[in-house]
Image (cartoon, rainbow, N blue to C red):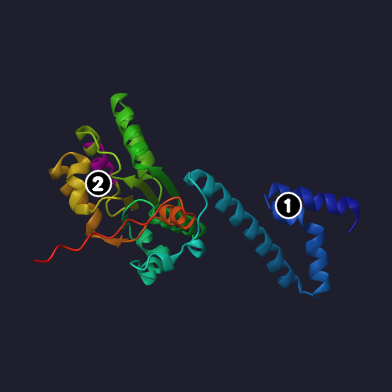
Amino acid sequence: MTVDDHDHLERMLTRLKLTAMRDQLDSLIDEAGRRELTIREALTLFCEREIARKDQRRIDMSFGLARFPFVRDLASFDFGAQPSIDKAQIREIATGRFIANGEAALFLGPPGVGKTHLAVAIGREAIVAGYTVLFVPATTLVAQLAKAHAEGRLEERLTHFAKPRLLIVDELGYLPFEPDAAHLFFQLVSRRYEKGAMMVTSNRAVGEWGSVFGDPVVATAILDRLLHHSQVVTIRGESYRLREKRRSGLLQKPAPAPLPATA
C-alpha cells in the first residue's frame, strides 16, 4: 500500500467515523497478516475493535451523565458483613430485568450498611448492559422539582427525570418532605410507573413513609405504585463506618443491658 493509498483509506475511515479502525489501522493489518486471516476474518476483527471502542466510549460517557457520587462495584461489596442480604436476590436485580420491565427496587436499612454502594454498583452494571441511568439524592430531586414548579417549568423537570431507563433516588427519608414536595414526588413516580424503572434507598421502613412525606395519603399512593412491581431488599446490619471505628479503637461496643434483678 502506497502512502497515498494509506492516507486515502484513513480519510475514508474518518468520514465513516470508524475511528478505531483508523487509529489502529497499521496494527490491525499486521495482526491480520500474522494470524493469516482471510478477508472475511480480517473484516470481522476490524469491526470487533471498532465496536469495542464505541461501546467503551458510550459506557464512559454514560457513567459521567449518571452522576454517581463514587465508583463502586458488586465485587467489592462485603456480603459476609451483611448476612441479612440474599446474594441471589442481588444477582437477580443486577441482571437488569427489573429495568426492562419498568419495575422498582428498594434498598431499606439503617445508615452505613451499603445501600448506596449496591445502588451505584447495580446502576453501573445497567449502563454496561446498555441502559441509561441517573443517580440523584432525594433532597436534590425534591429541591429541583419544587424550584421548577415555582418557575413554571415543572413539566420540563418531570420529563428530565422520567427520561432515563433507571432513576436511582438515594437517601429517601433522611429529611422529611414538605407537603407540596411530596405531591411533586408523587407526580414523578406516577410518570415513571410501569414505564421507567426506579431504585430507591431509604433508612426508613415503608411503614414510616407517611411521616417522611408529611402526608399518609400521598405516601400510600407512592408506595402503591412503587411496590406493585418491585423487589425489596431489607438490610439489618451494622454500619461499615462504625465497624471500622470500633476496630481502630475509636468506638467501643455498647455494654449489654443489665439483667433484671431477681427476688
Q: Which residue is mark 1?
A: 13
Residue 118 at x, y percent in the picture? 42, 58
Most extreme residue toward the left is 263
Residue 167 at x, y percent in the picture? 38, 49
- For the C terminus, which image quadrant? bottom left
Q: Residue at x 45, y 52 (%)?
A: 245
Q: Main secondary structure of the magenta part?
A: helix
For label 2, count other residues whose C-alpha is less than 10 Å away and answer few (under 14), some (14-19) or many (20+). Answer: some
Disc 2, SS? helix
Residue 117 in the image: above or below residue 189: below
Q: Tell me if I can see residue 255 in this picture.
A: yes
Q: Along the polypeptide, which appears first: circle 1 or circle 2?
A: 1
Direction from residue 191 to residue 44 in the image, left or right = right
Question: Could you say which is closer to the camera, residue 96 or residue 9?
Answer: 96
Residue 84 at x, y percent in the picture? 33, 67
Direction from residue 261 to residue 65 in the image, left or right = right
In reply to whether residue 189 is colored magenta, the answer given is yes
Real-space CA distance between mark 1 and mark 2, rounded to the nearest whole angstrom: 46 Å
Question: Could you say which is closer to the camera, residue 55 or residue 243?
Answer: 243
In reply to whether residue 239 is colored magenta, the answer given is no
- For the N terminus, which image quadrant? bottom right
Direction from residue 21 to residue 257 in the image, left or right = left
Q: Residue at x 44, y 50 (%)?
A: 133
Question: Could you say which is closer to the camera, residue 244 or residue 113?
Answer: 244
Q: Which residue is mark 2?
A: 190
Q: Quadrant of residue 154?
A: top left
Residue 215 at x, y percent in the picture? 15, 40
Q: Amino acid at mark 1?
A: Leu
The magenta span reads: 183-191
Q: Nearer the viewer, mark 1 or mark 2?
A: 2
For label 1, count other residues whose C-alpha is less than 10 Å away and answer few (under 14), some (14-19) or many (20+). Answer: some
Q: Residue at x 35, y 69 (%)?
A: 86
